Image (cartoon, rainbow, N blue to C red):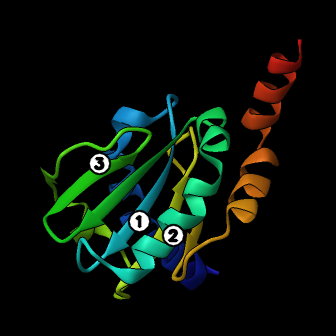
Amino acid sequence: MKRFLLLSIFLTIPLTMLSQSLSEYQWKNRLIVIFTETSNSREFQKQMQILNKDQAGLNDRKLKVIHVIPDKHQIVFPEKSGWQNSNLYQKKESKVDFEVILIGLDGGVKLREIKPVEIEKLFDLIDSMPMRKAEMRRNDN
């Protein structure tokens, strides 16, 4: 039991560090953070093609998309920003060349994938979250 608890604490440290780096968005936006080795990654291009299929859906769910490469990051949706110096890439916990992370309004990591994620999967997951359900009820009134 102690070993499991220590392992659980150890595994959440990098996620917490990543979330703290993006804390300015907490309670304002959900984030899709895409990590790649290079700015012109094929997987990144594919992920963006998938996301661009429903920009209205991204806006409705308060999503910002952030592209992270070693030493830099930029917002790519809803409006593209310039590259900014960043240590976000160093805070990711996996060693893969491509990773997509969904961060909820509360700053918690909700999804982590090492291949492009279909928009339906993202939307279904977000729409099942309590805060999103409350948003949809408010919008219906």
Residue 19 locus on image (x, y percent): 40, 51
* Circles 2 and 1 in contact, beta carbons < 8 Å: yes
CA separation, marks 1 and 3? 15 Å
Q: Mark 2 points at which residue?
A: 47
Q: In which quarter of the image is the N terminus?
A: bottom right
Q: Name the residue under label 1.
A: 34
The residue depicted at 59 percent of the width and 35 percent of the height is 59
* Quarter of the view holding residue 62: top right
**34 left or right of 125 in image:** left
Amino acid type indicated by mark 2: Gln
Q: Can residue 11 be seen in this view?
A: no
CA separation, marks 3 and 2? 23 Å
Amino acid type indicated by mark 3: Ser
Amino acid type indicated by mark 1: Ile
* Circles 3 and 2 in contact, beta carbons < 8 Å: no
* Quarter of the view holding residue 51: bottom right
Residue neighbourhood size for the residue with mark 3, other residues' Cα within 10 Å, grouped as few (<14), some (14–19), many (≥20): some
**35 left or right of 118 in image:** left
CA separation, marks 2 and 1? 9 Å
Residue neighbourhood size for the residue with mark 1, other residues' Cα within 10 Å, grouped as few (<14), some (14–19), many (≥20): many
- Label ID, residue 91: none
First in sequence: mark 2 or mark 1? 1
First in sequence: mark 3 or mark 2? 3
Q: Mark 3 points at which residue?
A: 21
